[in-house]
Amino acid sequence: MMKVLIATDKPFAPDAVKGIRAVVEKAGHELVLLEKYTEKSQLIDAVKTVDAVIIRSDIIDAEVLSAANHLKIVVRAGAGYDNVDLDAATAKNVCVMNTPGQNANAVAELVLCMMVYAVRNFFDGSSGSELLGKKLGLHAYGNVGRNVARIAAGFGMEVYAYDPFLPDDVIEKDGVKAVKSVEELYSSCPFISLHIPATSETKQSINKALLSKMPKKAVLINTARKEIIHEPEIAELMQERADFKYLTDIMPGNHAEMQEKFPGRYFSTPKKMGAQTAEANNNAGIAAANQIVDFFKTGNQKFRVNK
Ligand code: 3PG
């Protein structure tokens, strides 16, 4: 019997926890729950005796890993795993996985919702505009990008994508136009939705030089990561361009300044909520539980992300 911990600062929906418990207990393992913890020390205490951990954006760094002497696997119930120190996990022989695609539709629905909110002038009662016939650029075409493209097509948008890791035909078979460079994407599309991970190459890469290329009445949507934005430069750009709107699901460091300077053009959710739906919690949480059960039973490491 293995001990499986759910450690979520931002908890799953209660039904998702029930579903995870059912999978874990059916396989003969024990489930331990740590939700809404406020101190890192609580996480450190909780990992000491467990064999597996299911997390969301919770930070699993070298200090947490060094306390986890029985830990064999960490599953990030979601897509991005920049919150896990992969090298430290590898050094401790801990397998790290994600659950790609499981929360993608939820995030994509929020993207379209934010675009509507932007073009309807933050629902302030004034006459706005429509998405029909407008050009949307997807910066990366992974699971979320694909779902955004599918929904945007229903709105009648013209969808473009830039993804250097995918051949054009994979993008174009979905009726999306593949563009050759990031500059071409930004200069062609007044709507841009970001779907790149936070890596050493992408950090602060969404900067003034790139955003300045966007056509008039630009709308930038960020449901990806805070770190990819050059925060001081986006503030500078919005100061210069009264037609530029920025809506984000990850509150920036300069939120107070942005809110004060750009009312009606800047919006941030109070807490990242792209994946905060019952469906996404169920899909990602139960996938994580199944991956853990399978890992212990058969050694399956299909979704492993560390070497
Ligand atoms: C992800 O990487 O899957 C999303 O950013 C969702 O993150 P969350 O589980 O912390 O809401």
Image (spheres, rainbow, N blue to C red):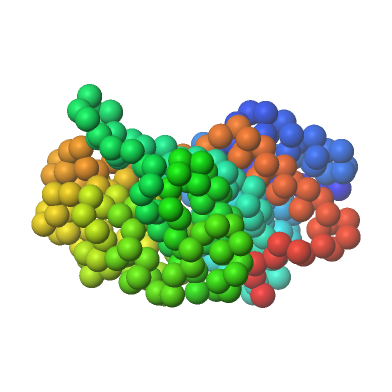
- Residue 133 visible in rendering: yes
> Residue at (56%, 34%) from the top-left corner?
277
**In the image, is residue 259 above or below residue 238?**
above
**In the image, is residue 271 above or below residue 294?**
above
In the image, 178 versus 266, the foreground residue is 178
> Where does residue 99 sit, x and y in percent of width and height?
66, 53
In the image, 177 versus 100, the foreground residue is 177
> Where does residue 274 sit, x and y in percent of width and height?
48, 42
Please state the total of marks drawn on the protein image. Answer: 0
In the image, 66 versus 271, the foreground residue is 271
For this orientation, the residue located farthest to the left is 240
Horizontal relation, residue 86 to residue 23: left or right: left
**In the image, is residue 145 above or below residue 108?**
below
Horizontal relation, residue 294 to residue 208: left or right: right
> Where does residue 257 sit, x and y in percent of width and height?
17, 47
> Where does residue 283 sit, x and y in percent of width and height?
68, 42
- Residue 196 visible in rendering: no
For this orientation, the residue located farthest to the top is 125
Residue 68 lies in what quarter of the image?
bottom right
Identify the image quadrant of the C terminus.
bottom right
In the image, 77 versus 265, the foreground residue is 265
Horizontal relation, residue 274 to residue 236: left or right: right
> Residue at (22%, 30%) from the top-left corner?
127
> Residue at (37%, 62%) from the top-left corner?
228
Residue 234 lies in what quarter of the image?
bottom left
